[in-house]
Image (tube, grey):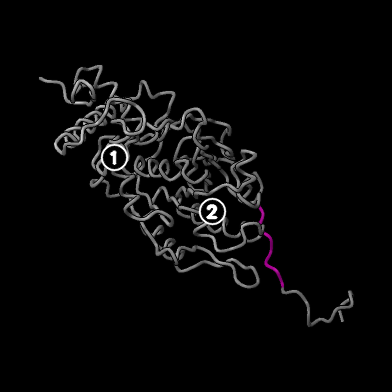
Amino acid sequence: MRPDGRSSSHALPTAPSLETKTPAAWRGTEPLKQRWLAAARIPSGDLTLYSGNGGAGKTETAVQLLVSVTAGLGDWLGCVVETGPALFLSCEEPEANVRDRIERICRHRHIDPHAIDGLHLHFPDLEATWLATANRLGKITKTVLLLQIETWISAHRPILVVIDSIAAVFDGEAIARRQVRSFLAMLRKLARENETAIVLLDHPSVRGMADGSGTANSVDWRNSVRAMLHLSDADKNDPDIRELEVKKSNYGRAGEKIKLRWNGWTFVTATSAESSPYRAAAERDVDELFLKLLDKRIAQGRPIRPSTGRGSAPFELAGDPEANGVSADAFRASMERLFTAGRIVSVETGPASKRRKHIERAPR
């Protein structure tokens, strides 16, 4: 018997000795400086949580980040980003949707999407998207998909991995502290060992939407990551406006807020929209698309009206299969530019008792 009264057969196994380090070990060495995938927003070698309601533009802006990093554009919504290979694990959007986003964003930036060979995409079967699952005792274990991703990351060393989204990849209890921490620890370890930035997309809970925290379920989702971004819903007074906020940053200053605007192709920083080197080119692209679709409608004998409501030219063109996602608001702004530049005119036709207006190209 042991002094505490327990049988010696239940003795605890001998634990290995505890290793410690003192500051003296740092003498003569330089401290490691924090590297950033996206300056002051997304740290390299760690996990960032990026939350936002469905439809706010979270995936769109994440794809913008992927394109910027792999195409060497050097910037993402007003901050500097590194250049290198990346992996996008899309567990919610099909390939066709992601392709549309990539090609549209590349048109906006005037680059060839087919020349970006460092952007790797994986679209798992919708019934096999789990990265981690909980057994009947609540223990979190890796799935085959996560093991495959770990092997791929180790071989290709991407500087960025984007995972869309928590709801599709975590097969555990979202409010169970141990399960949440165990899952996030797996991803953080993967990020650290491979010096890659992992961005995990998330939908906030009802409470997270109400209090503006952007978190979902257990607070451990926020507490267990080193950085957190949140994308707001559309502004009530302007549906094209969003706000990207740095909610948490253990390696820098939190609280940065970036106002974004949808410009007809994708999101740009609203504060720099007027001076952006891409704005004029993007507007020219929308103008040329407007004229192309106008010619198509006239050839079909389906003229469009120069008004601004339903049934108007902007509304009709936005619904065209060849509109490539350009919004009615973007076409409305394009129509005003084309009228001002004298490239289109309003023409009246029909009998005197029932005159109708439609748009045509201005005569040369």
Residue picked out by circle 1: 106
Identify the element where label 2 is drawn: helix
Name above or below for residue 60 compared with residue 220: above
Residue 350 placed where, x, y %? 18, 25
Report the predominant secondary structure element of the magenta stretch: loop
Q: Secondary structure at mark 1?
A: helix
Mark 1 or mark 2, whichever is nearer to me: 1
On the image, which quarter does residue 329 sit in?
A: top left
**Label 2, residues with CA under 10 Å away: few <14, some 14-19, many ≥20:** many
Q: Earlier in the sequence, mark 1 or mark 2?
A: 1
Compared across the picture, whether 324 is left or right of 143 comes to left
Q: Residue at x 62, y 47 (%)?
A: 206
Residue under the image location 20 percent in, 30 percent down: 291
Taking 220 as reference, is 4 above or below it?
A: below
Disc 1/disc 2 C-alpha distance (Å) = 31 Å
Residue 290 visible here: yes
Magenta region: 14-21
Q: Amino acid at mark 1?
A: Cys
Q: Residue furthest front?
A: 353
In the image, residue 235 lies in the stretch drawn in magenta: no
Q: Which residue is mark 2?
A: 188
Residue 10 in the image: state x and y as whole percent.
Answer: 78, 79
- Out of 349 and 116, give the one closest to the viewer: 349
